[in-house]
Amino acid sequence: MGTRQLSDEELAGFSDEHLQYEVGMLHGTAQALRDPPRDQDGTIGAIIEYALLESFLIHARVLINFLYDGPKRDDDVAAEDFFDEEEQWTEHRPAKSCLLRENRERINKALAHLTKVRVGLKPEMKQWEYWEIKNEIVGILAHFCTLVPKCRLGAEFRRFVSKCWDSQIDGRRASETLKFATAGPTSAAFATELEMWFSDPAPKANDHRAAATAAFACLLDAQPEPARAAFAYCLAVAMVQAGKARLVETRAGDASAVCVFETVAGDTFSMAKPRITKEQEAALIDAIRHILEEAGGL
């Protein structure tokens, strides 16, 4: 049995207030460290920089504990508490990476406690991969949101995690992407969508991509409806594999099976499933995962 001692309503309230605070501080301090406030002469005060870093690391530690360590005391709240059976989380969460495992120990030894490990630390050993840590934790939380029963997570928390997750992946909410997929994209909408997904910081790269996406959009518009529907389904599968949505159910429809997807923001969308075999579907998922891995989306 799970360790859950709070009611559904209490868990939803806890996520909206306390979990959202932890994620907000993690995300906010990481952004502040990347673009820190500066003095009038353009310098960054050491105290401010250290305070931001220490705040980030403490909130990272809290969330790593929440996601992976389980409740160690009677009044601890852990990710398992949001499920009826703890295995519903422990057997489906991503494995703890070396990045999180090693930095969790570093935080304990170099920040939360006075230890002998601090003696003789070289300057390069005092650097922290705060942006990578933030991205990984937010990604795991997005996956957590897709697994927890909807009644146990506050709507504000779901939306906030969705916003943080989308900001580091493609700059758009998952719901907006699935709205685009289910609406039947026109050439203009498709071009806009792909530019948002594959935008590049370099303006020249964006110019080339804008032209390429517009050309491909015209090609898609010229295709028959089954091809357009297949594209929408592929986009939804990519959202699932990236942890931004989950497949709720597949049910019988008038002409073909209908898939229902739910985003991390809690919005649901339905679309026709192409007539493909299980082998073809498995090959499609493998191909999409390969693309996402190469793009850094997994």
Image: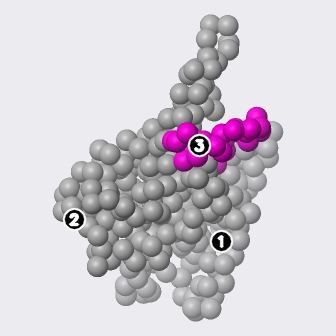
Q: Does 146 sit above or below residue 49?
A: below
Q: In the displayed orientation, state which residue is furthest to the top.
A: 40
Q: Which mark is residue 163?
A: none
Q: Residue 187's quadrant in the figure?
A: bottom right
Q: Amino acid at mark 3?
A: Thr
Q: Position of residue 194 (x, y in %)?
A: 64, 54
Residue at the disc numbered 1: 289
Q: Position of residue 114 (x, y in %)?
A: 55, 39
| Mark 3 and mark 1: Cα distance apart in space | 42 Å
Q: How is the image coloured?
A: one colour
Which one is closest to the eye, mark 3 or mark 1? 3
Residue at the disc numbered 2: 5
Which one is closest to the eye, mark 2 or mark 3? 3
Q: Does 251 sit above or below residue 208?
A: below
Q: Residue 204's quadrant in the figure?
A: top right
Q: Is residue 5 left or right of residue 260?
A: left
Q: Which residues are magenta?
A: 107-134
Q: Amino acid at mark 1?
A: Arg
Q: In the image, what residue occupies the spot 65% across and 72% down?
A: 288
Q: Residues within 10 Å of mark 3 (few under 14, many from 20)?
A: few
109 falls in the magenta region: yes
Q: Quadrant of the N terminus?
A: bottom left
Q: Are marks 1 and 2 in contact (CB under 8 Å)?
A: no
Q: Secondary structure at mark 2?
A: loop
Q: Secondary structure at mark 1?
A: helix
Q: Quadrant of the C terminus?
A: bottom right
Q: Position of residue 113 (x, y in %)?
A: 52, 42
Which one is closest to the eye, mark 1 or mark 2? 2
Pick the residue in front: 271 or 122: 122
Pick the residue in front: 283 or 71: 71
Q: In the image, what residue occupies the spot 27% across and 56% down?
A: 75
Label 3 vs 1, first from the N-terminus: 3
